[in-house]
Image (cartoon, rainbow, N blue to C red):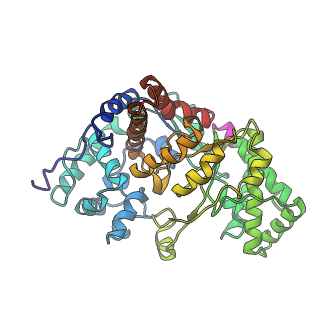
């Protein structure tokens, strides 16, 4: 078969169990949730794209440039990030087409990955592509998708409705004015609820480059004197309230570890003052951040914002790539992380507080069964976050249910999160989760561990009810 005419992989039973007894049950379960709304409580879509509602520029800027899941695989296969336009603004038509040709010519690099599944779903389900990308058909596919993007019916807000996105969370700096969110909320034609998420990491890492300047700006927008520790806490509290007023439901924390350890107020104030003077040590900075995680939890108990943790990533592993292309360009690498001892001080204080929801994510499957599932199976505040980032793949999602669900139960799961900047991949990512969850529950029905009506109810819960509950929607 010619590469230019090979069909795209879009079988209706993709990812459903191959067992002939289980598959018909999985089909019925999946059919019950296939068209339910998408609830996306953690993601990275830029709200300004939705506010402007301009046509997407070209296939490369939509499907390649912003998606480090895609660019890292191509880079590993020898494709330079520069040739893909990573870290740049809009590309010329010639460069965008060249980047698209590189993707199509290296389509084989995606085999066996969830990126391939997502792409197949996007290309077939959104753009009407029926042929597998290749060097031979790259230009024809580029022209087909580019033409589709220019249709006024295919602008970002129309796609929000087409995708059935009920709730979409973005990720935002505490000093952001949230003007795009306010404008979207005030627009009666926008039916999706688009909420900011409070991401304070840069303000809690005292030794990070640019910390003092960032804190100074935080003080200005919060109208708080951040020249001392009490004023810094007040600034964070005020900005959290501002986010709540603009629809936020959660905070997001992604540090090197999950350790929480209290400091005496005087000690915290001293470290903060030394940081402002540029005299803080690495050990003091770590101690301050670990103390501040307790402060963040206390603030969540007061203002109700859900607290999500996803530690255990070595950010910007390749400094030359960071210097040339910036962060979030595919070279963040997992490291070992521990939760049981790390979170004990926090959970001792707030683990049974009725207003705290704490969602724990990891990129380590062993941690799921050894620590997160038992924690979620005791503390009413703790929920097990869905497989995330490197675990957002079929094998890990299937193992997740064995590692977590059978220890803590379905009611202790967060529901799926897509964690993406690639807007058009959102439906495909949620579809993958629904298919895999249907397969897991179908096996329980086939093994007579659940009745089918219970399985349907559980699957609907995972898709819409659980994320609404966990993220207080």
The answer to whether residue 90 is left or right of residue 469 is left
- In the rendered image, the residue lying farthest to the left is 1
Residue shown at 35% from the left, 55% from the top: 113
Report the quarter where the C terminus lies: top right
Say if residue 229 shows up in the picture.
yes
Nearest the viewer among 305 and 10 is 10
Say if residue 190 shows up in the picture.
no
Q: Measuring from the top left, give residue 275's x and y in whole percent.
A: 78, 70
- In the rendered image, the residue lying farthest to the right is 266
Residue shown at 50% from the left, 34% from the top: 462
Q: Which residues are magenta?
A: 243-247
The answer to whether residue 389 is left or right of residue 356 is left
Residue shown at 38% from the left, 43% from the top: 432
The answer to whether residue 273 is left or right of residue 194 is right
Nearest the viewer among 340 and 236 is 340
Q: Main secondary structure of the magenta part?
A: helix
Q: Quadrant of residue 60?
A: bottom left
Q: Measuring from the top left, give residue 293's x and y in whole percent.
A: 73, 55
Nearest the viewer among 449 and 1 is 449
Q: Measuring from the top left, give residue 120's x and y in whole percent.
A: 29, 47
Residue shown at 74% from the left, 68% from the top: 285
- In the rendered image, the residue lying farthest to the front is 448
Q: Measuring from the top left, give residue 182's x and y in whole percent.
A: 60, 38
The answer to whether residue 261 is left or right of residue 201 is right
Q: How many numbered discs, if any? A: 0
**In the image, is residue 246 part of the stretch drawn in magenta?**
yes
**In the image, is residue 283 part of the stretch drawn in magenta?**
no
Q: Is residue 276 shown above or below 249?
A: below
């Amino acid at each position: 078969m010619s590469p230019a005419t090979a069909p795209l992989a879009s079988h209706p039973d993709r990812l459903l169990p191959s067992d002939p007894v289980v598959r018909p049950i999985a089909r019925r379960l999946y059919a019950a949730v296939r068209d339910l709304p998408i609830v996306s409580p953690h993601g990275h879509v830029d709200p300004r794209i939705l506010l402007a509602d301009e046509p997407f520029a070209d296939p490369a800027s939509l499907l390649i440039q912003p998606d480090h899941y895609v660019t890292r695989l191509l880079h590993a296969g020898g494709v330079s990030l520069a040739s893909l336009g990573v870290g740049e603004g809009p590309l010329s038509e010639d460069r965008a087409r060249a980047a698209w040709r590189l993707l199509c010519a290296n389509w084989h690099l995606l085999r066996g990955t969830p990126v391939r599944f997502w792409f197949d779903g996007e290309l077939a389900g959104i753009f009407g592509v029926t042929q597998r990308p290749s060097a031979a058909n790259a230009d024809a596919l580029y022209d087909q998708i580019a033409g589709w993007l220019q249709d006024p019916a295919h602008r970002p807000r129309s796609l929000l409705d087409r995708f059935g996105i009920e709730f979409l969370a973005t990720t935002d700096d505490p000093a952001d004015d949230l003007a795009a969110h306010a404008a979207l909320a005030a627009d009666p034609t926008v039916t999706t609820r688009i909420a900011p998420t409070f991401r304070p990491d840069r303000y809690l890492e005292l030794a990070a480059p640019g910390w003092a300047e960032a804190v100074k700006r935080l003080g200005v927008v919060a109208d708080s004197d951040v020249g001392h520790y009490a004023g810094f806490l007040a600034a964070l509290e005020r900005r959290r309230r501002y986010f709540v007023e603009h629809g936020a439901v959660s905070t997001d924390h992604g540090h090197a570890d999950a350790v929480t350890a209290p400091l005496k107020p005087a000690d915290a104030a001293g470290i903060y003052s030394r940081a402002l003077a540029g005299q803080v040590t690495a050990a003091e900075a770590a101690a301050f951040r670990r103390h501040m995680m307790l402060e963040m939890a206390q603030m969540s108990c007061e203002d109700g914002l859900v607290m999500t943790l996803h530690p255990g990533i070595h950010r910007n592993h390749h400094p030359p790539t960071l210097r040339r292309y910036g962060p979030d360009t595919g070279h963040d690498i997992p490291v070992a992380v521990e939760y049981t001892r790390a979170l004990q001080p926090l959970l001792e204080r707030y683990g049974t507080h009725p207003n705290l929801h704490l969602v724990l994510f990891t990129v380590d499957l062993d941690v799921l069964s050894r620590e997160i599932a038992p924690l979620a199976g005791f503390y009413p505040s703790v929920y097990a976050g869905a497989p995330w980032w490197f675990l957002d793949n079929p094998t890990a999602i299937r193992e997740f249910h064995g590692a977590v669900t059978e220890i803590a139960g379905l009611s202790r799961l967060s529901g799926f999160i897509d964690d993406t900047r690639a807007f058009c991949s959102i439906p495909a990512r949620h579809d993958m989760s629904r298919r895999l969850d249907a397969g897991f529950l179908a096996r329980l029905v086939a093994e007579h561990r659940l009745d089918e009506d219970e399985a349907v109810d559980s699957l609907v819960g995972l898709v819409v009810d659980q994320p609404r509950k966990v993220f207080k929607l």
